[in-house]
Image (tube, grey):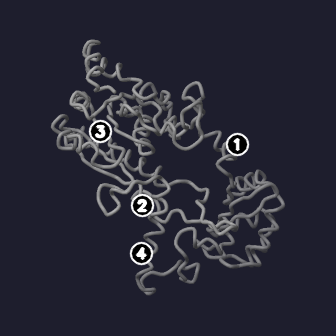
Amino acid sequence: MKTGFLSGVRVIECSLLGPAALGGHLVDFGAEVIKIESPAGDYVRQMTWPIVEGSSLLHLHINRGKKSITLNLKTPEARAIFEDLVKSADVVIEAMRPGFLDKMGLGFERLRELQPKIVFCTISGYGATGPYRDLPSHGVAYDAWSGVIAPVIDDDGFARIPAQTNIGITAGPAFAAMSIMAALVRARTTGEPACMEIAQSDSAAYFDWYRIETHKAYERPQSEVTGNASDNFERRAPGLGGMWEGVRYQFYASKDGYILFMASEQSFWKNFCHGIGRADLFDTFPGSTYADHARGNTALQIELREIFATKTTAEWLAFADEHNTTIAPVNTPQTVMDDAQFQNRFTWASTDQLGCEQLLLPLHVAGEEIPMPTRAPENGEHTDEVLRNILHLDEAAITSLRAAGALG
C-alpha cells in the first residue's frame, strides 16, 4: 500500500498525554496528522515507563507518524496560523480538557467558518458534561470509575492497583477514531460538518456493556429475565463473574503451563471426550446442547485436572486442532510475543524505524501492506516545514513569526 486508506486527509491535533492516541489511529490509516504543541511541549515524552533513549515508549507509540509544530496560541499571530491550517484540514482534534480551543476563540463555530466541512472531535477524561467534567485525571481513573478495575488488598492490608489492561485510554481513542471516519464519510458525501466529543471514562463503561446491561436486566423480575436453560434458568453473575464455578469452561494446568478449556457446546465436549478415548466421560456428563459449563461439578473437574496435566500446552493445541475442540493457550504480555499465532499475525517496527520496537496496526489487507509511520516527533520538529509547505510562507515571514513569539 503506497498510501493509506486516509491518504489526503489532514488532521490538526491539539493534544496532551494519552488521548493523543486518537490521532495515532488516524496516522496508522495514512492520514497526515499535525500535532500542535505549546512552547513547553507535550510532557508525555517524560511520562510513565519505559524511557527509551530519553523519550517515553508512550510518546514513541501514540505520536508516531505525526508532524509537530510549536504554536503559542496565546498570541494572535499563532492563532492566525492555526486558522490557516484549519482551512486546509478535514479534522480538528482537541485531545485535552474540553473547551481549550473555545477559550482561544477557536471553538467549533469558528472552525466551521474557516472550513465548512470540518469534523471536530474532543476527547477527554470525563467528557464535556457532568459533575466530573473539570476533574483532572489519569487513565486508571476511567477504569476505576466504570468498574472495570477493582482494588487488590496486599498482605499488609494496603489497597493496590492490579496488573491488568487499561481499557478507557485504549477504547476512548479507538471509538473516537471510528466516529471521526464515519463523520468524514458524511462530510465528503453531503458537505455537512460534525462536532462531537467522547470521554475515556464513557468508553471504559461502554467497553464493559455486557456486565452493565446484565445488572440492569437483572433488575427486572425473575419471571421476565432468567439465567440460561442449561443452568436451570438460575441467574449467573454478570460476565466472567459467572464463570467461577465453570468446569467445562475453565483454566487447567498443563504439563508446562496452563490452558483454557472452552467446551460450552456439546459437540466440542463430545469431540474432546472421544479424542482422549474417554467416551465414558461424555456418556456420564453429556450436558446440554449449548452453554453448559457443568457448574460446580467437582467430580468432573478433578477428572479434567488430571487429564490436562498429562500433556504440554503445545500438545493440547495440536490435539484441539486435530479433534476440533476448544482449547486455548494461556499467555502473559511477555510470553505472547513468542506464541506462533502472535508471530504469524503481528508485524514489529524496528528501533531504527520508530526509536524502539513497536507493534504495527494488526490489520491485514489482501495484496497490500499498511504504511510504515515515521518516528514520533520532537516538539516543533516540523514547524518550518509545515509553514513552508502547507501555508507557503517564506523565510522572512517565518522569522517574523518567531520574533513575535508565535512559534515559542
Q: Amino acid at mark 3?
A: Val
SS state under label 2: helix
SS state under label 3: strand
Which residue is denoted by mark 1 in the rendering? 338
Quarter of the rendering occupied by the C terminus = top left
Question: Tag 1 or tag 4, which sits nearer the N-term?
Answer: 4
Rendered position, 11 above or below 385:
below
On residue 216, the disc is 4
> Which x, y percent locates residue 330?
69, 55
> Which x, y percent locates residue 360?
53, 36
Q: Is residue 317 found left or right of 217 in the rendered image?
A: right
Which residue is denoted by mark 3 in the rendering? 92
Q: Amino acid at mark 4?
A: Lys
In the rendered image, the residue lying farthest to the left is: 113
User: In this rendering, which labeled residue sits more in front, label 4 or label 3?
Assistant: 3
Q: Is residue 104 visible?
A: yes
Q: Nearer the viewer, residue 273 or 108?
A: 108
Q: Amino acid at mark 2?
A: Tyr
Q: Is residue 319 found left or right of 74 in the rendered image?
A: right
Q: CA distance from mark 4 to mark 3?
A: 37 Å
Which residue is denoted by mark 2 in the rendering? 206
SS state under label 1: helix
